[in-house]
Each structure stands twice: as C-alpha cells, then as structure tokens.
C-alpha cells in the first residue's frame, strides 16, 4: 500500500493516514526499531533492548502495511513504503495529536483542565519544518508580490525557520523570533545563523525586535492564541513596521475552509486558549492596532486550506 501524500493530522477528511500505521510507526521510531534495521527479530531486540515477542508482532504489522519487508534470509528490512525522515516526523507529530485528542477532549468538554503533555522541541521542529519546506516558496511568492520592495522581514514564531530561509534566498534580511526552547533548537541545528538569519528569543507579547521591518510575517501563530493576545501582538508590531511595509497573517480562517474546524480542535487542546478565528475578527484586531487591512483575503492553493490577510 502506498503512503498517503499527507501524513499529518491535518489531512482532508477521508484522506488521513491509517491510524494503525501512525501508532505503529511512532512506537517503532521511539523504540529505535528503524535505527536497527536490517536485522532479525533477535538481532534488533538485542541491539535495541526490546521484547522479542512484542517486536515480532509490531514488525509483522509493519510488514502488512509495507513499511518493512522480510528479506530472503529472514531479516527485516525497510519496505517499499518506509517513510523518509520528513514523512516520519509528520507521522510522529500526528501520533502525538491522536493521543492528545483521545485523552484531553472529554476533560475539556467537562470544563476540566486536561493533563499537560510534554512537548519534544526537536520533534515539533522537524514535523513542522517538513511541511513548511513544501509550502514556503509559494507563500513567500505571494508575500513578495504584495510587498515587492521589502528588504527586511520579521518572522514571528518562526520555529523551524524555513520561511526565514526562503526570504533570505530572495535577498531579504530575516530576523526570526521564537520562545527560548525553539531558538535553542535553531542554534543547535546551525542552519539559520549560517544563512544569515538573525535569531531573537522571547515572547512577542512582551517585546519584539526594534526593526524597522518592511514585512512582519505571522504564520502558524495567531490561531495559537485568543483574541486579546492577538490584539496585543498586532499593537506590538505597529511601531516596528516600516512606512510602506505591512503585515502578512497566514492562518486557517474559521467559516472559510472546512479544515479550519478540525484544526480548531488541536488549538483547543494546546493550553493557550487557541482557536481558529474569523476574517471579521482579524480585521477588527488589525484595525484596532492601527493597520489598514487589504480588501481581499487570498486563499493559498495547495497550502493546507490556509489563507493570508495583508495589512499596512
């Protein structure tokens, strides 16, 4: 069986990956099974410190799904549908979303606080980076068509930095701001600073770099927060946006795409009072912060049902 094109939890309804594949691949990756292929059950169990019986059951299930296969000598090897590094990162992030939905939705509905779930910064980085690499060129195309004279960009909550890297490839000077844990991952990976991206750590509700910036780029952050904090963010951005510059907000708009309703479930459970918001809400927050919002919203084809609002 061929793997779906979209292995994330945000695949369109009816196109999501088989939940069994998601759980099995995540468990195998976490236990180090894939790191010890090829090998027999006893070989892999010995090297990875695993229970041979449980390992055999999991490997046979993965064989049925095409993720591994059995070679002529009886050893297990990567199969025709073995996920590559990017796909595996998406699968593992998907598995964490499944666990969160299964354990936290009922408490949330009852008004209880769900148990906190530890976040693995490296896995979170890799999963979102894999998707961003596919869409960043198109998103940056749209932004630079709107602001063709832009020379500096502030990438807010940039996380993996794939958008910063793409802006840098187009000749812009990029500054990426994120929380200290994610900036630490970026510094450790080394790609961004090597490409000339400036890193700025800290909450953008408290402080943003002084700028001025021709473009403040907000992708994947505003739906993480409620309206009050989005209004505070846009107020903080107003003084650092250069004359003639503006803001790009890339997000899922509630009421505009059906996938936004599914994404809102993930935001409900992220602990920051996040949600997908309507176009009307974004317009009101940006206007209250002193921005003039473009008349039209652009839907980004092939970008996971996201849209972009521009304001100056």
Image (spheres, rainbow, N blue to C red):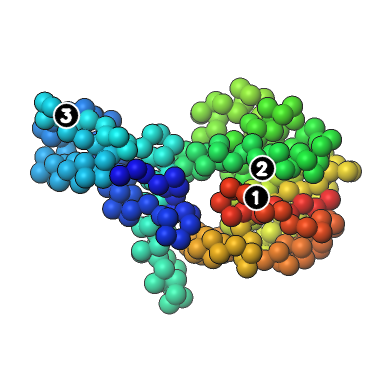
Q: Is residue 197 visible?
A: yes
- For disc 3, the neighbor class at 10 Å (few under 14, some 14 to 19, many from 20) is some
Disc 3 target residue: 71
User: Which tag, 1 or 2, sits closer to the chain's start?
Assistant: 2
**Labels 1 and 2 touching (C-beta < 8 A):** yes
- Return the x and y of residue 205 as percentages of the image width and height: 68, 53
> Label 1 to label 3, Cα distance in Å?
44 Å
Q: Residue furthest front?
A: 1
Q: Residue at x 44, y 36 (%)?
A: 86
**Residue at the farthest bottom position:** 110
Per the rendering, the mark at residue 195 is none
Asked whether the beta carbons under mark 1 and mark 3 sit within 8 Å of each other, the answer is no
Dot 1 alpha-carbon crowd within 10 angstroms: few under 14, some 14 to 19, many 20 or more: some
Residue found 55% across the figure and 38% down from its top: 134
Horizontal and vertical percent for residue 154? 72, 40
Sequence-wise, which precedes: disc 2 or disc 3? 3
Say above or below: 249 vs 278. above
Q: Observer-nearest residue: 155 or 187?
A: 155
Of the image marks 1 and 3, the number of the one nearer the N terminus:
3
Residue furthest to the top in view is 194
Query: Toward the viewer: 278 or 271?
Result: 278
Residue topped by disc 1: 300
Q: Which numbered disc, 1 or 2, marks the residue closer to the eye?
A: 1
- Distance in Å between CA atoms under marks 2 and 3: 43 Å
Residue at 36% from the left image edge and 57% from the top image edge: 99
Q: Which residue is mark 2?
A: 139
In whole angstroms, how far apart are the C-alphas of marks 1 and 2? Answer: 7 Å
Question: Callout 2: helix, strand or loop?
Answer: helix
For discs 2 and 3, the disc positioned in front in the rendered view? 3
- Residue 65 is left or right of residue 57, and the answer is right
Query: What x and y, as percent, mark residue 72?
Result: 13, 27
- Decide: marks 2, 3 in contact (CB < 8 A)? no
């Amino acid at each position: 069986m061929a793997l779906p094109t979209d292995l994330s939890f945000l695949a369109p309804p009816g196109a999501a990956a088989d939940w069994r594949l998601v759980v099995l691949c995540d468990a195998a990756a976490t236990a180090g099974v894939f790191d010890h292929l090829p090998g027999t059950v006893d070989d892999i169990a010995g090297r990875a410190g695993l229970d041979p019986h449980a390992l055999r059951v999991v490997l046979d299930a993965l064989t049925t799904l095409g993720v591994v296969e059995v070679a002529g000598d009886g050893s297990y090897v990567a199969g025709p549908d073995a996920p590559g590094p990017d796909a595996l990162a998406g699968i593992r992030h998907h598995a964490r979303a499944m666990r969160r939905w299964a354990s936290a939705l009922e408490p949330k509905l009852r008004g209880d606080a769900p148990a906190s779930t530890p976040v693995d910064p490296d896995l979170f980085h890799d999963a979102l980076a894999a998707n961003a690499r596919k869409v960043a060129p198109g998103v940056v195309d749209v932004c630079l068509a709107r602001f063709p004279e832009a020379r500096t960009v502030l990438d807010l909550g940039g996380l993996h930095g794939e958008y910063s890297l793409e802006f840098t490839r187009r000749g812009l000077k990029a500054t990426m701001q994120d929380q200290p844990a994610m900036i630490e991952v970026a510094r450790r990976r080394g790609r961004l600073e090597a490409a000339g991206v400036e890193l700025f750590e800290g909450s953008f509700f408290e402080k943003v770099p002084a700028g001025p910036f021709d473009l403040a780029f907000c992708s994947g952050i505003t739906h993480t927060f409620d309206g009050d904090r989005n209004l505070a963010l846009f107020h903080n951005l107003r003084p650092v946006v250069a004359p003639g510059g503006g803001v790009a907000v890339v997000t899922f708009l509630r009421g505009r795409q059906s996938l936004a309703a599914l994404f809102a479930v993930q935001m409900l459970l992220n602990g920051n009072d996040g949600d997908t918001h309507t176009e009307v809400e974004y317009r009101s927050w940006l206007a209250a912060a002193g921005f003039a919002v473009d008349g039209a919203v652009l839907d980004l084809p092939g970008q996971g049902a996201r849209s972009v609002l521009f304001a100056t």
